Amino acid sequence: MENSELNTVYSMPRIGDEAPDFKAKTTKGDIQMANFAKDKWILMFSHPADFTPVCTTEMSGFAERKDEFTALNTELLGLSIDSIHSHLGWVNNVREKTGVYFDFPIIADIDMKVSKLYGMLQPNESETAAVRAVFFIDPSKKIRLIMYYPLNVGRNMDEILRALEALQISDEHGVAMPLDWKKGDLVIVPPPKTLDEMNARIADKSLEKVDFYLAKKSL
Ligand code: BEZ
């Protein structure tokens, strides 16, 4: 198939889009995105294939840090283009070999429906396996952040948790996060939009300022 043909077939959700709806079979039963994890954040992530080494480390990472996601009001939802039988065999094998249990739903996207809908199938990387995607979906079902990693590079769990927490704190306080921000660091207050706001910002002694357009505060 020509690349131009593939580009017209597969959609690529973008930040700010409503999470496309779908029904799917998972290791914890049938789900529909529109009804899944109401009032919670959803972290939906794909892995290329069951019973592969990098994927095993990544899925174990999600499982081992599930409590941290729960504390951030976030449900985990895995996906790969494998069958339910393969998922069950892999989950059981990893539990037997390492004691780590993937206690979250994993979509069996054997017909690639969800992978195509979410741009996880990137044919110039692989025509048969999903890339390592992560979709951060907020409680209103809006996509807020997307990560795509290739087949040969595992993701970073600290960064996934950091980005999730940054989004939530940014929403809660109407602030933005600077380079390398982590919980407890100063946050950026939105820059002024009028001369009056600019003058007020210049006069404000409570902020740590480089200048009126770059000011930070603690929460
Ligand atoms: C892995 O998880 O190790 C892997 C999966 C697909 C392609 C390359 C590596």
Image (cartoon, rainbow, N blue to C red):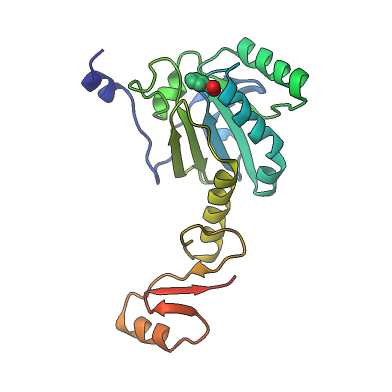
**Residue depicted at 69% across the width and 19% down the height:** 91
Quarter in which the C terminus is drawn: bottom right
Kindly identify the residue that appears in the image at 51 percent across and 42 percent down: 137
Whether residue 83 sits left or right of residue 211 in the image: it is right
Within the image, what quadrant is residue 74 found in? top right
- Residue 4 lies left or right of residue 185; in this view the side is left
Q: Position of residue 61 (x, y in %)?
A: 65, 34
Residue 24 vs residue 192, the one in the foreground = 192
Q: Quadrant of residue 160?
A: top right
Q: Is residue 96 left or right of residue 1?
A: right
Q: Examine the rendered structure and indicate whether residue 211 appears above or below residue 159.
A: below
Q: Up-down: is 131 above or below 190?
A: above
Image-quadrant location for residue 131: top left
Residue drawn 49% across the image and 38% down it: 135
In this view, the residue farthest toward the bottom is 203
User: In the image shown, does 137 or 211 lie closer to the viewer?
Assistant: 211
Foreground of the two, 74 or 212: 212
For image coordinates 46% across by 13% down, the residue present is 111
Image coords of residue 80 (percent x, y):
53, 21
Number of numbered discs overlaid on the protein picture: 0
Q: Position of residue 71 (x, y in %)?
A: 69, 48
Name the one closer to the observer, 124 or 42: 124
Q: In the image, is residue 13 above or below residue 97?
A: below
Q: Quadrant of the N terminus?
A: top left
Residue 123: image location, x then y, percent: 34, 20
